Image: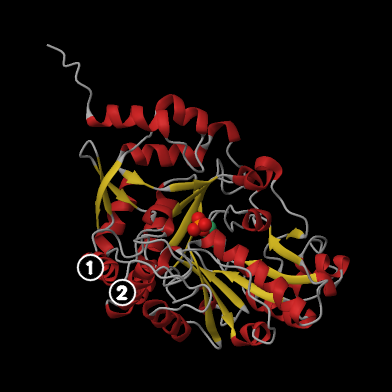
Amino acid sequence: KVSIKKTKMESLSELDRKHYLHPTTPAKMHFEQGPSIIVSEGKGINIKDVKGDEYIDAMSMLWNVNLGHGQKELADAAQEQMMKLAYSSSFFGNSHETAIQLAEKLASLTPDDLNVVFYTSGGSESNDTAFKLSRYYWQIKGQPERTKIIGLERAYHGVTMGATSATGVREFQNFVNAKAPDFFHAKAHQTNCELGDKSDPNYEGCIRDIVEKEGPDTIAAVILEPVQGAGGVLFPPEGYMQAVRKLCDEFGILMITDEVITGFGRTGKMFGVNNWDVVPDMMTVAKGITSGYSQLGAVIMKEKIRDEIVKTDDVLFHGFTYSGHPTACAVALKNLEILERDNLVVNAKNMEKVLKDGMAFLEEKHSIVTKTRALGLLGAFELYEDPASGKPFDPSIAAAHKVVDECFKRKLILRTAEWDGDNIVAIAPALIVNKQEIENIISIL
Ligand code: PLP
């Protein structure tokens, strides 16, 4: 006898298709087929779906669930804060205790005098805020013509108008042609060019070239990720971050680093820039600040930026209803406490070796695996038909997608980057991951 009663998966899938338009998803395919997984619970680095199947989440979802699932202390912190004070505005002179405490904590963690915090609800809002504050800073300093923002090709900074405009991954740029004027994209990672080597064949289109062509006095800021995440887990070459800092200093341009993925231990240091001892003028954070348990982002800026802003009698006409939301701040404080108490930044650094060894094993075993890399728990490898000659796979094969799909069938969640013909598979498990769990991930791969 065949049961005609729908399973929970089938009925939820039907409702999902009917009522739910998903972000960053192939819309037609999703509408026709429904969700590939409907997640219902999580514990540590594992998640379970409504069918009861368990998966290893080797991506910390969107590189954000850094403490893993099921951290009761975070839930308790949220509950306690909600019962004490559900919400308080930060507008019009209001402040509240948790937001102040978190601002002090962030100032203590960031390098140098990155000591002043503006809160947002996520990464995109943080980047838009950083762009507006850059322009505002120059306006107050009597240089209102400094309005332009230079980002890098293959950078990902989010999807609000400003963040989309700075994003260099072309698919996001091309979507409804959302690029605002005054945003430029430079070739990424051209160290010598940024140091001023004009004979370098890649000079045209590097940051320095754009600065010179547009005029230094028109550039407000340069933004870059210490490690490009969604663009393919691309590390800057030796000396690059320092070269960009030098270039910004030379032309008086503000340097913004987008630490939305790299912040709070992901790369084995508290912040990505700590790997290169570079101090930006502003840093944008989100994701790992709460490990995804609540929605929070921030711009953490040097005191010199605040010092200019407080010179005017103007109202700072920028802010979100949920800037400094008490629950999000309480969760962030507890999240950072656990991160330090449990030495998770050190764990990320220690697990880097296990991840690298595992990927080296894959490279040895499979002729198509190459360019394995990791900094802390931000790792990736690439697939080429013939790595020795650099022959890529035919794009119609969608090699990286195939690997990720096969892993999904084997209950392992990974993610691809397939821009410009690259077949990159990213691996970024939660910072609580242990050796055995990484070895499981590698053995499934
Ligand atoms: N910046 C980086 C480097 C990111 O990876 C992301 C999201 O993946 C963002 C910004 C955007 O953050 P959000 O999705 O919280 O707006």
The residue that label 2 is drawn on is: 334
In this picture, residue 52 sits left or right of residue 143: left
Amino acid type of the residue tagged 1 in the rendering: Asp
Q: Could you tell me which residue is drawn at 39 percent across and 54 percent down?
A: 59
Q: How many marks?
A: 2
Residue 351: quarter of image: bottom left
In this picture, residue 174 sits left or right of residue 61: right
Q: Could you tell me which residue is drawn at 65 percent across and 41 percent down?
A: 175
The picture places residue 386, in percent across and down from the top left corner, at 56, 43
Structural crowding at the residue carrying mark 1, measured as other residues with C-alpha within 10 Å and reported as few (<14), some (14–19) or many (≥20) = some
| Pick the front one: 101 or 197 | 101
The residue that label 1 is drawn on is: 76
The picture places residue 49, in percent across and down from the top left corner, at 26, 41
Residue 405: quarter of image: top left
The picture places residue 205, in percent across and down from the top left corner, at 80, 60
Q: Residue farthest to the left?
A: 1
The answer to whether residue 445 is seen in the rendering is no
- Is 12 situated above or below 274? above
Q: Could you tell me which residue is drawn at 51 percent across and 79 percent down?
A: 93
Q: Could you tell me which residue is drawn at 83 percent across and 74 percent down?
A: 216
Instruction: Please identify the quadrant where the N terminus is shown.
Output: top left
Looking at the image, do the residues carrying marks 1 and 2 touch, with CB atoms under 8 Å apart? yes
- Is 188 situated above or below 100? above
- Is 195 situated above or below 423? below
